[in-house]
Image (cartoon, rainbow, N blue to C red):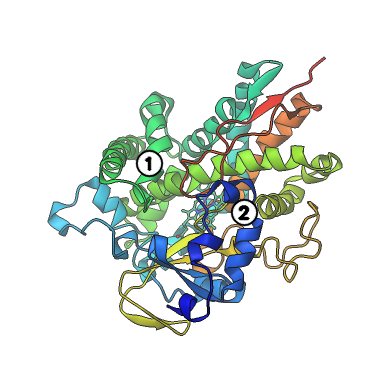
Amino acid sequence: MAEAAQNLPPIQDIFDPNSRAYMENPVPQCLALAERGPIVWYEPWQAWIVTRMEDIMRCWKEEPLSSDFYDWEFAPPRPPEDEWSNFERAMIGHSLLAEQDHHRLVRRVTAPAFSRNVVDAIQSKIEPEVKKLFDELGTPEVFDYKQEIAFHIPFISITRMVGIPEKYWPEIKQVILTFTEAWNPTISDEQREAARQDSNRAIDIIKKVIDERRAAPEQDDFLSTLLRIEQENEKFEEGDIITLILALIGAGADTTLVAQQWSVYALLKNDRAQIAKALASPDAFSNAFCEINRWGVSSKMGFARYAPRDMEFMGEQLRKGVMVLMMPHLKDYNPQYYEDPETFDVERTFNPDVMFGYGPRYCIGAALAKRQLFLTLSELFTRFPNVELAEEPERDETDHNAVVFKRLLLKTNIQ
Ligand code: HEM
């Protein structure tokens, strides 16, 4: 209505993340959407979009909206508690996504399990596996980085981090790769049912692993840490451990697969002097990764929230259950935020750095994600210092959440 009154073109004509134009170059569309105002109704998705950083930061920090998928108006109905399967237990009783007080408790008691020291210790478990992956790759002239390397990294990191024994790897591998589907708001009922069954299988495996670990001596991994936390905090229970592990799988698998692709692509598409700067140390990479992400603008949907009731929000009347998408990536080429935004500079200053969110729901796995990327990219450029893109990678139209590549062919240029 507002569009007609102001004679503006329909919103989907200026912003359509599923269009070929967006996948080739999202920047003009992101800038045009932000121009429309701080909060924009996006008819095709029946969702509001929050476009400006000051409002997004406020939402992240104060949480006026719900993060619970089941609060979405188009989510499948919330079944009664006595009919919950493991899947609903994980999704509805999800300690990280649902009720705010319990979320705070879980974050507070588990914070030590994600500290930098723990990530340092996990590095020693992940590093040999990354090297093994490259050993198995050998020295081909050309290879698909996505298929041969990137695809395996989330699995390696999550199983090592949690402490899932090797005998369960074949079973859990497929589950890790498809589990995130259950949170995808755009999939069909059949796809959600398949994801639901995978999730139930994953939960059965996690329960077995927990039972075995309770009977075994404490080990140096995440699961042992969580079992200790469970003993020390009466409000932190086995269900929390399961949902937390599922959250790690759900939030840590797809994100790192996307990040792997864009990190390699960005470093190979730009001035090669940036590669050494980016990989000079884990801290240098931490900053470089913000720039990789800014330069690539891979996000399509941003971060979803749902109106918990009929409410006023940023001057608009929201109906209960409506989706609100926060899109921090709209700012990535806006000169008001970044000087000379076309330039790729891994030493650019980010203040604040919001790559991993902000406030109470700041990414739990940020340190781990950056470390696994640092390790893998260091290995790639050490083994193949003259590596180049073998072709401009074709974008994969089937991914609803991010611009990703169908494959990422690299030429090793090994003599
Ligand atoms: C490069 C990879 C990653 C990126 C860019 C990323 C980014 C983010 C962002 C932006 C959020 C906040 C989402 C929101 O506000 O709705 C988040 C939350 C989260 N991330 Fe990550 N993440 C990455 C990898 C990981 C990994 C590897 C793990 C686990 C091992 C992980 C676990 C989580 C969890 C559990 C949350 C929810 C936290 C909460 O609700 O309290 N993430 N992530």
Q: Position of residue 170 (x, y in %)?
A: 39, 25
Q: Is residue 318 above or below residue 90?
A: below
Query: Is mark 2 in CB contact (under 8 Å) with mark 1?
Result: no
**Residue that appears at 69% across and 39% down:** 265
One can see residue 79 in this view: yes
**Residue that appears at 71% across and 29% down:** 380
One can see residue 105 in this view: no
**Residue that appears at 38% across and 50% down:** 184
Spatial CA distance of label 2 from label 1 is 28 Å
Q: Position of residue 395 (x, y in %)?
A: 57, 39
Of the two numbered discs 2 and 1 in the rendering, the one whose residue sits closer to the viewer: 2
Q: Is residue 364 above or below residue 198?
A: below
Quadrant holding the N terminus: bottom left
Q: Position of residue 28 (x, y in %)?
A: 65, 59
300 to the left or right of 128: left
176 to the left or right of 111: left
In terms of sequence position, does the residue under pointer 2 or pointer 1 come before the other? Answer: 2
Q: Position of residue 322 (x, y in %)?
A: 35, 69
**Closest to the observer: 92 or 162?**
92
Q: Can you tell which mark lies on residue 26?
A: 2
Task: Give the residue at the far left of this rendering.
Answer: 82
Q: Is residue 216 above or below residue 18?
A: above
Look at the numbered disc 2 and give the secondary structure of its residue: loop
Kind of residue sitting beneath label 2: Pro
**Residue that appears at 65% across and 57% down:** 27
Kind of residue sitting beneath label 1: Phe
Look at the numbered disc 1 and give the secondary structure of its residue: helix
Crowding near the residue tagged with mark 1, few <14, some 14–19, many ≥20 C-alpha atoms within 10 Å: many
Crowding near the residue tagged with mark 2, few <14, some 14–19, many ≥20 C-alpha atoms within 10 Å: many
Residue holding disc 1: 179
159 to the left or right of 296: left
Q: Can you tell which mark lies on residue 314?
A: none
